[in-house]
Amino acid sequence: MKREGQIRVDSQNLFPIIKKWLYSDKDIFLREIVANGCDAIKKLDSLCLIGEAEKSEASPRIDIILDKDAKTLTVSDNGLGMTEEEVEKYITQIAFSGAQEFIEQYKDKTDADAGIIGHFGLGFYSAYMVSDTVEIDTLSYRENASPVHWESDGAETYEISDGARTDVGTTVVMHLSEDGMEFCDSYKLLSVLKKYCRFMPYEIYFTCVQDEAAKTPEQQAEEPKPVNITNPLWLKAPKDCTTEEYEDFYREVFPDINLPLFWIHLNVDYPFNLKGILYFPKQTDKLQVMPGEIKLFSNQVYIADNIKEVVPEFLMLLKGIIDCPDLPLNVSRSFLQNDGEVAKISRHITKKVADKLISVFKDERAEYESYWDDISPFIKFGCIKDEKFYERMKDIILYKSIGGEFLTLSTLPKSADNKVYYVSDMSLQAQYVKIFQDNGLDAVILEHNIDTHFVTFLEYKETDIKFVRIDSEIGEALQGTPPEEEDDDSKKALEELFREALGMEGLEIKVQALKGTDTPAIININEYQRRINDMNRLYGNMFGPEDSKLQETLIVNSASEIVKKLRDMEAEDRNLLCRHIYDLAAIGQRRLSAEEMKGFITRSVKVMELIG
């Protein structure tokens, strides 16, 4: 017998609001309907364990059936089912919803990022984002229960009648609307299932009626396979997982041709429930930090990627999965920001990552050093973002010397005035590196883009250290012995000689004896100015005007034999050589512009002609 009733919501605008609010992410409806099925199975399992329900011989499962011709999408489970009274309570009254509260809170909102599904028991109603009409056929596990059929087109009324289902469970049939036609595609549905339901705890089977009909008898006879993994690796105890399993799981979840360097298996039961695996990926770009991907789950149901309120921002350089059953499926960012337990979870994840890194450093130092190029951007970014993380990491941060040795903060090579020289480009600054090495001096290599920030951060934290790029100044260690004939007048004359030959207004010129006599000149740029310039380059001139030019200082090496001969040369040849010396110094400091390179090549030919 068919009975009619009115959905007990005071406003007729409920369904338009649902559709408007959830339209931007409407594929989430499938997660909601399938998750409801999983909940129903889980509840039935729990009742069976305490003897309040009879366990079925059938394995728990969810079936998803697409019929392209009928334009229907069906989700069926063998969970606990519902009685007519429960359908009235959980469907028509919008269970636990306080629907009036929902209407008042959301009717005037325009921000579609509020994530309202689930907030008011509306998970089932997400089906109306893609459907004109939705039907439910259900049979409760309760003794002598009768099957129930419910149907509504999303207006204010519904029809409820005797159903035809013979086995315990619930079937939801969605008659797809014009807006939902994209889900009449097998590949689209499979991609949504892979995104949201890939690790749900009960087997999910997908069938397309038309695809099945097109199969050969042999194909139809093949045993169907679930589209999900019901017992993902993160649920296992770390001691029971092999390296091969960790690597296979990484390949399964993340599109990366490289295997991870190593991983952290999170397994926490107290004071909160948290499981997961975080992988340290191999960085393919040695200059830019490659973004990672942290997938957040709740009871094996996908929530979202890269939720920085749960996973600290710097951990987003990693790849992995975190499953936290204590988080609701449709948690809002404002909730996360103000929830004390979420903050504890975030701190705990950071601590576990730090503990793992310290453990590898202490127990597998050679392996740690081999990972360093890949993990250093992550560690340095973490230190900059979280000073507590820096305090734990500072003694295991490595600094590679130009001689290839790995050093720590306490063993950094410092000058007498506590300066640490560093190299940001081994190729470009090769001339300066050679001068250091020829004179038994050391420097550290800091070539990654993040090092521009990191050295400034280090100076803030370690106030007794000053970082200076190897081409920024001539320290006492590099100053050589002046020639016997050198005095203030001769130095001034040499400066004027170069100033006249170069004719570069604004170029500062100094004459100074260097230890290396085979280098006629070098160019220095002030460390502070250069850092500002690097920041501008990275952040679009945030720290100064676009046309700001770095102040160059040409250091003419008075100990160089070539420089000594300049005074005795003809003016034309002397000017040519002075410009050539400047070009060579500039190449050691920066990349030449197209015009500068063209001039350098032309002058190089003329210099060779002097030999003849």
Image (spheres, rainbow, N blue to C red):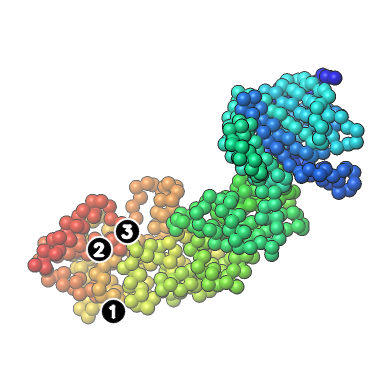
Relative image position of residue 521 (x, y in whole percent): 26, 67
Mark pair 2, 3: CA separation: 10 Å
Q: Nearer the viewer, residue 377 or 238?
A: 238
Element at label 1: loop
- Residue on which disc 3 sits: 590
Relative image position of residue 409 (x, y in whole percent): 52, 71
Dot 3 crowding, Cα within 10 Å, few <14, some 14–19, many 20+: few
Q: Look at label 2 and name its amino acid.
A: Leu
Q: Nearer the viewer, residue 293 or 239?
A: 239
Q: Earlier in the sequence, mark 2 or mark 3?
A: 2
- Residue on which disc 1 sits: 481
Q: Residue at x 20, y 55 (%)?
A: 599
Q: Residue at x 34, y 63 (%)?
A: 427
Q: Is residue 58 left or right of residue 452?
A: right
Mark pair 1, 3: CA separation: 28 Å
Q: Earlier in the sequence, mark 2 or mark 1?
A: 1
- Residue on which disc 2 sits: 584
Mark pair 2, 1: CA separation: 23 Å
Q: Indicate the quadrant where residue 486 lies.
A: bottom left
Element at label 2: helix
Disc number placed over residue 170 in the picture, else none: none
